[in-house]
Structures are given as C-alpha cells and as structure tokens.
Image (cartoon, helix red, strand yellow):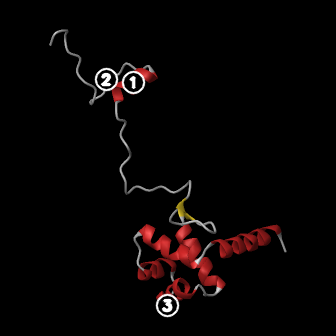
Amino acid sequence: MSSLAMSSFVEQQIVLHQFTAKHCAQARLMLGWSREELARQAGVAVAAIQQLESHGDVDDQTRLILAFRLEAEGLVFFPGFAPGWGMSARRFDTPAAEPTNQGLMSRLLGTTTATIDSPTPQPNGA
C-alpha cells in the first residue's frame, strides 16, 4: 500500500473510532442543525442519521461522511469528550471583544494616538 493510501486509511480508521453517535447529536446542536439539515449538507439520508444517533450503527462510509462534513464546519472530535471548535475554526456569529480601557492599553503599548473612546482631557479644576 502506498504511503498516501496508508495515510488515508489510517486517518479514516482514526475518525471511525473518534466520531460517536453522541458526537453527531452534540455537533448538530452546536451548529443549530436539524437532522434534516445535516442530511442535506452531508448528502446522506435522514434515516441514516437517525440510525446513527439512536443505535450507533451505520456503515463506515456514512459515519466518515458525517464526521468529515461536521469537521468542515470547524468541529473536532475526541473519544470521551464533547465536540469542540478546532484551532482553525473561524466563527463570525459573535462580535469581537472590544478592549475595556483603550486609554490604558495605549499607555501600556506606548502609543500617543487618542482613540474615540478615550476620555477628553479636562483642564485642572473642571
């Protein structure tokens, strides 16, 4: 077996052992997807997803398709743990956190540029 084929085989075996029926249901909830949506996104039958989530038994090809489709959304799977967002996951549905005190950050970083949120200096006694 060539190294590329072996690599693919090994990767598939790892996925088959890491991706569980519980992972499938949890991942759908994390994405806000119904069984029907996952079926549409993965190109598999809704009945296959129901079979996996209810009884944990589907053919290897269906399990791989579902795992790879959910991984394409940025999820990662490890036995014994709930799915998580991978390092490369880019989630844009939450706004980026704003610094709480830009004036302090400017002082710490040594910049002298005023920011919109910085308080306007007041003369002494004002």
Q: Secondary structure at mark 1?
A: helix
Looking at the image, tell me whether mark 2 or mark 1 is earlier in sequence order: 1
Task: Identify residue type, mark 3.
Answer: Ala
Where is residue 116? Give x, y as percent: 27, 30
Task: Identify residue type, mark 1.
Answer: Ser
Q: Quadrant of residue 80?
A: bottom right
Q: CA distance from mark 2 to mark 1?
A: 8 Å
Q: Is residue 124 left or right of residue 37?
A: left
The residue under label 3 is 47
Where is residue 79? Give x, y as percent: 64, 69
Q: Is residue 92 left or right of residue 3?
A: left
Q: Is residue 74 above or below residue 50?
A: above
Q: Quadrant of the C terminus?
A: top left
- Contact check, label 2 and label 1, Cβ < 8 Å: yes
Q: Quadrant of the N terminus?
A: bottom right
Q: CA distance from mark 3 to mark 1?
A: 57 Å
Q: Residue at x 46, y 78 (%)?
A: 38
Disc 1 crowd, CA 10 A, few/some/many (<14, 14-19, 20+) = some
Q: Quadrant of residue 65?
A: bottom right
